[in-house]
């Protein structure tokens, strides 16, 4: 290629990058090289620019060593998925270059640590790309801050794509503030030196990366797990017990820190059985309670979930799913626990299963979960998954200031009327006495019982209590439409249903197909069980074709839907430990739709 | 603890209308009787008492006591009781169950309750057998016992509940006998008075599947008068060298309770700065509304 040709290609690449408003950045390196910190700085910078982000990180299960990477996709408006081909790769080492080169789009930027070699000519990847070797490690060492290799990389990146210096410097100051002024200064020095190093090599002109409108609401930046924590505290949760497990541990750590700040109680349990037991004991006594876990821990909780149902004690269980079965792939993504969340345990034990779709809805869904648990006095499970738990996103300030909370119906003494804890009622809910209330003494029972709570095994009473417990599900199913998000035409010929983190790529795929004139729409229920009635189920019945998009092997929500409607349903599922991309979903849809 | 000064409650006031399901002659009647007496002696307000149990014959006890109760699942009385106590420290909490509950399926919880030291009185009715399932060896059954599950004699060494509890960190460890309800009531009173995790193993024989009343009656005796319950090494020695029939307080120490520990943590947290890693931490105090809290912990 002649020099003018190369320059023309570079100009085209950069202009596409910054005008296209859709930038996909990937940072790759060895665990311990600051990949995750670099990603955090990057997204704080973009947040300051009032842009939206979608992050995705993968790391090895081992604590030290191993390859990890962090991807940030940014747009001015909401970002729905990780995106397809990469625009800019920041490679901290040779493995970073070699492992990810294939993911770059044609004309992408490869910003790599100078001692690394460019990919081999025959390596699969773009035919043309802009190679930017920057001596990241060397710069960091020279400037007396050897750990700042990642910041050097960001300096080059900021220079290459035109991120305002003020924004990235502010982000760096924030991230390193805890380590003291000296560390902040050192990092800023490295950042500026790397920016200069980029400026000194021949490069295409750099227009400024667009910021969001100055008057737009910035929103609160947090991870999905953080949003669960905030939602729980907003809903009135003042007791948490948990046992560490990936990827739910950040919820445990955040609540260990935050709950006592609001006079709440945190207990680290000896196992997940104890965790749910502690939460049930606290809730029995009247304090709203929660536990959070992942698949293996959730399996251990099965028996006590049934106790929550039978004894009618509200509790919220967050299940941050990861790839199963058994230990499975603890640091990989999957939505494979739906069947367990709906059906785990013995007997007919109704519970409610909600699924968050974004960090923003993780806040709302957690508040909803507490409200339902309180109102209906039963267990509510909040389904998260690894990618959603870990990814950063925006929580709408209106949601944070405008939420509504509910408390359980508490028994009030009536003269001459003996208290019946499990009094049969139309909606299955009976007022509960809390310890300390005189005259309300009763025994909460896991054994089948009569209305007073006394053990009772008559056929009639067992039937009545079963009906009582299941009537609560009727209430939720009938108001189910309030938990469904829609996009596209009202009665579409092709209806896509997606839940949890699959919502983003599915929605993006649907939008792409709709843009091409295909008659398609999407429904995203945050209530998975009971399956929402009303508009949702009518749309499923009426559509020409129905597709369910989810990340698990057997198509578990498709299975649940088939129990509700007598019609064929296409399952678009996969279980490879990764999230769906919009491209994948669109391709799978098109195989059927044509 | 609130008390009713005007009308002193008697043991009868702590009974309920439900009649125990236990076999006539079951040791658990004696334990229940002693518990009613102890509660009357302490004038515990029934509405401020919570009894949490597991599953088994003895775990039915909450139904026979005028109090709030939670009859849970097999083995999990201690975590659930701890949840009650830590959420509402002002409540009096008793955990009850049998040897299967606390030393088999729920064994994993007992040492953790012991080291955390919640102010809970744990009454273990030990009959050395699985009675509700009609007579299989339990973790406290003695070697060579022939039962439904050990037709060729039991070969598993029994658990030593007293030594185990002391080593795990329980701050009050005692043994009583259902056949001596007056002395047992006294031990329960002391267990309730104790600020911390009190383990009270009660020999409570099963008349139907493992009737050891005669041996127990003959064997039961008080701990040596000169034993100092503050002497941990001596307490463990007594527990290890005894034959399981010594009754009295083996061990007692004062240590901060879990409630005190959690109150300490809350003190340290009040005014703690938000964590700048996430916007969440900044917002926590803003979203923590009083009206969304049902009962303040």
Image (cartoon, coloured by chain):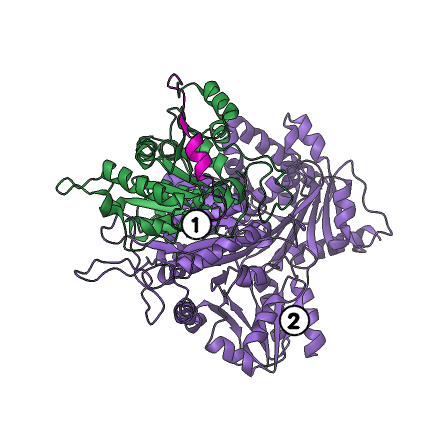
Chain colours: A purple, B green
Q: Nearer the viewer, residue A564 or A171?
A: A564
Residue positioned 21% across, 58% down in the render: A413
Mark in front: 2 vs 1: 1
Q: Nearer the viewer, residue A330 or B138?
A: B138
Q: Which residue is mark 2?
A: A571
Q: Nearer the viewer, residue A18 or A147?
A: A147
Q: Which residue is mark 1?
A: B57
SS class of the residue under badge 2? strand
Location of the N terminus of chain B by quadrant is top left
Q: Is residue B113 visible?
A: yes
Residue A23, by quadrant, is bottom right
Specify whether residue A445 is painted magenta: no
Specify whether residue B223 is painted magenta: yes
- Pinpoint residue A410: horizontal percent, then vertical percent: 28, 57
Mark 1 neighbour class, 10 Å CA radius: few under 14, some 14 to 19, many 20 or more: many
Taking A179 as reference, is A30 above or below it? below
Taking A364 as reference, is A536 above or below it? below
Pointer 2 chain: A
Same chain shared by disc 2 and disc 1? no
- Looking at this rendering, what residue extends furthest in the right direction? A122
| Count of numbered tags | 2
Residue span colored magenta: B208-227
Dot label at residue B125: none
- Pinpoint residue B247: horizontal percent, then vertical percent: 40, 29
- Pinpoint residue A214: horizontal percent, then vertical percent: 45, 54
Residue positioned 72% across, 53% down in the render: A108
Pointer 1 chain: B
């Amino acid at each position: 290629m002649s020099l003018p040709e190369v320059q023309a290609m570079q100009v085209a690449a950069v202009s596409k990058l910054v005008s296209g408003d859709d930038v996909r950045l990937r940072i790759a390196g060895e665990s311990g090289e600051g990949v995750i910190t670099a990603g955090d700085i990057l997204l704080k910078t973009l947040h300051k620019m009032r842009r939206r982000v979608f992050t995705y990180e993968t790391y090895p299960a081992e604590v030290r060593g191993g390859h990890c990477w962090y991807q940030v996709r940014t747009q001015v408006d909401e970002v729905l998925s990780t995106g397809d081909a990469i625009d800019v790769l920041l490679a901290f080492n040779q493995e970073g270059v070699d492992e990810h080169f294939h993911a770059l789009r044609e004309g992408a930027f490869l910003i790599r640590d100078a001692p690394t070699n460019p990919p081999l000519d025959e390596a699969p990847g773009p035919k043309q790309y802009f190679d930017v070797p920057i001596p990241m490690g060397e710069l960091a060492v020279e400037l007396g801050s050897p750990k700042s290799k990642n910041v050097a990389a960001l300096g080059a990146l900021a220079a290459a794509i035109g991120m305002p210096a003020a924004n990235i410097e502010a982000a760096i100051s924030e991230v390193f503030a805890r380590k003291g002024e000296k560390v902040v200064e050192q990092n800023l020095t490295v950042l500026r030196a790397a920016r200069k190093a980029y400026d000194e090599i021949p490069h295409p002109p750099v227009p400024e990366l667009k910021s969001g409108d100055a008057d737009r609401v910035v929103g609160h930046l947090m991870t999905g797990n953080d949003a669960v924590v905030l939602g729980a505290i907003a809903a009135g949760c003042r007791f948490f017990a948990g046992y560490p497990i990936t990827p739910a541990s950040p919820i445990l750590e955040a609540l260990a820190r935050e709950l006592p700040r609001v006079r709440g109680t945190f207990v680290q349990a000896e196992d997940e059985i104890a965790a749910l037991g502690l939460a049930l004991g606290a809730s029995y006594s009247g304090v709203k309670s929660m536990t959070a876990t992942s698949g293996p821990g959730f399996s251990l909780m099965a028996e006590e979930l049934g106790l929550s149902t039978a004894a009618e004690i509200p509790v919220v269980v967050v299940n941050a799913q990861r790839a199963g079965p058994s230990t499975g792939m603890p640091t990989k993504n999957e939505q494979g626990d739906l069947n367990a969340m709906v059906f785990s345990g013995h007997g007919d034990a109704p519970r409610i299963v909600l699924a968050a779709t974004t960090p923003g809805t993780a806040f709302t869904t957690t508040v909803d979960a507490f409200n339902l648990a309180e109102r209906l006095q039963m267990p509510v499970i909040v389904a998260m998954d690894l990618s959603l738990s870990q990814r950063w996103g925006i929580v709408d300030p209106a949601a944070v200031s405008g939420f509504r909370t509910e408390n359980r119906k508490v028994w009030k003494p009536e003269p001459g009327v003996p208290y019946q804890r499990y009094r049969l009622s139309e909606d299955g809910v009976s007022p509960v006495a809390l310890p300390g209330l005189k005259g309300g003494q009763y025994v909460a029972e896991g054994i089948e019982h009569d209305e007073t709570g006394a053990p009772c095994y008559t056929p009639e009473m067992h039937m009545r209590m079963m009906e009582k417990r299941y009537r609560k599900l009727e209430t939720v199913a009938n108001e189910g439409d309030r938990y469904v998000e829609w996009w596209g035409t009202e009665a579409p010929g092709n209806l896509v249903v997606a839940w949890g983190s699959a919502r983003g790529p599915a929605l993006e795929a649907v939008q792409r197909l709709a843009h091409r004139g295909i008659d398609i729409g999407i429904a995203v229920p945050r209530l998975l069980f009971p399956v929402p009635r009303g508009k949702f189920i009518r749309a499923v019945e009426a559509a020409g074709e129905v597709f369910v998009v989810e990340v698990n092997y057997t198509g578990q929500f498709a299975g649940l839907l088939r129990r509700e409607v007598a019609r064929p349903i296409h399952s678009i599922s996969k279980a490879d430990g990764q999230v769906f991309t919009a491209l994948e979903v669109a391709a799978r849809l098109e195989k059927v739709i044509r | 603890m609130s008390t009713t000064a005007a009308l002193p409650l008697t043991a009868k006031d702590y009974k309920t209308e439900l009649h125990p399901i236990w076999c006539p002659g079951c040791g658990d009647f004696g334990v229940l009787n002693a518990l009613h007496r102890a509660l009357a002696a302490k004038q515990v307000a029934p509405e401020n008492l919570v009894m949490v149990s597991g599953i088994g014959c003895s775990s039915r006890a909450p139904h026979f006591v005028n109090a709030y109760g939670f009859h849970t699942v097999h083995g999990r009385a201690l975590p659930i009781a701890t949840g009650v106590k830590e959420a509402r420290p002002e409540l009096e909490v008793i955990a009850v169950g049998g040897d299967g509950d606390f030393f088999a399926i729920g064994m994993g919880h007992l040492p953790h309750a012991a080291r955390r030291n919640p102010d809970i009185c744990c009454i273990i009715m030990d009959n050395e057998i699985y009675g509700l399932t009609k007579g299989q060896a339990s973790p406290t059954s003695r070697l060579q016992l022939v039962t439904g599950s050990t037709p060729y004699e039991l070969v598993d060494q029994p658990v030593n509940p007293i030594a185990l509890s002391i080593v795990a960190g329980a701050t009050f460890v005692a043994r009583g006998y259902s056949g001596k309800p007056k002395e047992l009531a006294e031990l329960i009173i002391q267990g309730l008075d104790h600020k911390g995790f009190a383990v009270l193993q009660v020999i409570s024989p099963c008349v139907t599947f493992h009737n050891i009343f005669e041996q127990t009656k003959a064997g039961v005796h008080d701990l040596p008068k000169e034993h100092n319950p503050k002497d941990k090494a001596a307490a463990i020695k007594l527990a290890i060298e005894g034959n399981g029939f010594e009754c009295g307080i083996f061990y007692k120490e004062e240590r901060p309770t879990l409630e005190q520990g959690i109150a300490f943590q809350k003190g340290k947290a009040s005014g703690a700065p938000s964590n700048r890693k996430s916007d969440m931490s900044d917002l926590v105090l803003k979203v923590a509304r009083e009206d969304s809290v049902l009962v303040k912990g």
